[in-house]
Amino acid sequence: MTCQSSESTDTIDGDGRAHSTSTSVGSDESRIASAMKDLRNTDLSANRSAPSAHLHGYRSFPPPTPHMCSLMSSGWYWGGLTANEAKEVLQDASEGTFLVRDSSQRDFLFTISAMTSAGPTNLRIEYKHGKFKLDSVVLVKPKLRQFDSVVHLVEHYVHLSRTGDKTPSDPRPNGTVQLLLTRPAYTATPPLQHLCRVAINRRTRRVEELPLPNRLKDYLTEYGYKV
């Protein structure tokens, strides 16, 4: 993501700590201001582009909802991409690069394909009782968090991967490699409007307080995620 921010470390006591915190807040404010400026100068109608050629078809369940529309708007949902095609997309990517695609197995809706230190791998997403969670061994399943949408799920595990908890799912007994989700693989270069939206979402949840026209605030709230 071109609008990524680096996490600042705060290890100095006293005045040093206060200065670091002030610098971080100032940096966030300047980045929000910059993103808002770019957003004002773009044409939102241009962001309503046709679906990617990779979106061969969309599953009939769960029914269309704002959450499912968010997945379509994310830029890293590749629709009917096969496992082999996903492997080709990720082959030269850095560890932590990921995408979401339709699962090839009838019992699952979606699959996360991600690059690990051992190469591309796949992790299915289970949909049950209106909730999404990662597929895992039976003994681990009760411990896995459930989410209202696929984007919520991905956002959660991206946050864990970026902030130090490097294992999205609980450790498996067979010693498989760690799975990191840090960088989405986009189907195409995302529109500047969307990148600005994600950048703003990463730094504030108070969209209604931003000095923006209502139409831009509506655009921001249409996709209220950080990834």
Image (cartoon, grey):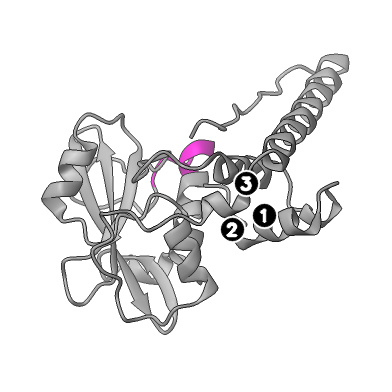
> Disc 2 and disc 1: Cα gap in Å?
6 Å
Q: Nearer the viewer, residue 44 or 110?
A: 44
Q: Residue at x 46, y 53 (%)?
A: 74
Residue 32 or residue 17, whichever sits in front: 32
Count neighbours of disc 3 (C-alpha within 10 A) and say few if under 14, some if 14 to 19, many if 20 or more: few
Where 25 falls versus 145 (above or below)? above
Tag 3 near tag 2, CB within 8 Å: no
Residue beneath disc 3: 43
**CB atoms at circles 2 and 1 under 8 Å apart?**
yes
Q: Give the residues in magenta.
A: 160-167
Give the percent coordinates (x, y) of residue 79. 28, 60
- The x, y position of residue 50, in whole percent, is 40, 57
Q: Disc 3 or 2, which lies upstream in sequence?
A: 3
Residue type, numbered disc 2: Tyr
Residue assigned mark 1: 220
Q: Which percent across, then down, holds residue 121?
A: 20, 46
1 or 3: tag closer to the N-terminus:
3
Q: Is 175 situated above or below 82? A: above
Residue displayed at 59% across by 26% down: 6
